[in-house]
Image (cartoon, rainbow, N blue to C red):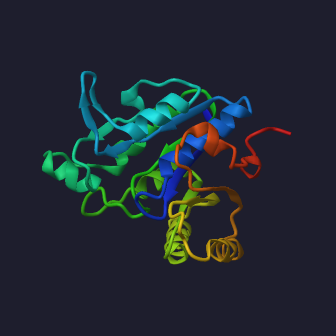
Amino acid sequence: MAKKAFFVAGTDTDVGKTVVSAGLLQAANNLGLKTLALKPIAAGCEQTEEGLRNGDALLLQQTASQKLSYDQVNPIALEPPIAPHIAAQQLGRRLDADRIAALCRGAMMQPADFMIIEGAGGWRVPLNNRQTLADVPKQLKTPVILVVGMKLGCISHTLLTVEAIVKDGLRLAGWVANCVDPQMSCYQENLETLQSMLAAPLLGEVPYLDNVNPVDVAEHLNLSNLSLVNK
């Protein structure tokens, strides 16, 4: 069974959840840990000879040291590149937090030291008219790693997301500052404000990278505050 499992959430869509998730996996690989990764829901999948495939899910599958089949990594693959619940509606399907949590629990039985479950979009992405994706980590009781897209407005987005995470009864294990806007004004001041207002540790700052790969991202991350290695 996975010893340490974390749900990776973002302050918004397109803030680099997958980039950071892959970097976290690589950083754990560098420590000699056995790693697993899931992206239970992925919209914007492409048709291939093997079936629907999502680039983000494939990156997580490739980076994790413990290999799972694609269907285990990404059990719910949706082709339209839109909000998952709308994509599901267009396909005549219904997303359900209980089923998604059960799929995650099955994968969590695999032996691993460190496991990432990557979300989709922001914290309150709907699954249906009464559930959001946040109901999945709530059922799994997994601590959360928050990816903050460093851009104008990130402070409010971050504080609101953290407020929702805590309200849902989950622990913010740490956060990562990911520079998505290389022209961001007052980057350092924004970072220092977040550091002063968040109780959770900053796991790293990922600069704007032209060629993003897990090895480079891992160089900017520090997992020591996640207590993954027994001392």
Query: Which quadrant would residue 195 be assigned to in this image?
Result: bottom right
Query: Which quadrant would residue 163 be assigned to in this image?
Result: bottom right
- Quarter of the N terminus within the rendering: top right
- Residue 105 at x, y percent in the picture: 47, 37
34 vs 69, left or right, is right
- Residue 9 at x, y percent in the picture: 50, 56
- Quarter of the C terminus within the rendering: top right
Q: Nearer the viewer, residue 77 or 110?
A: 77
Examine the rendering and report whether any part of residue 4 can be seen: no
Q: Nearer the viewer, residue 58 or 225?
A: 58
As displayed, is residue 124 above or below residue 194? above
Q: Nearer the viewer, residue 85 or 182?
A: 182
- Residue 220 at x, y percent in the picture: 68, 49
Examine the rendering and report whether any part of residue 214 can be seen: yes
Instruction: Name the residue rendered at 52%, 51% in the picture.
Output: 8
Instruction: Name the residue rendered at 48%, 59% in the picture.
Output: 10
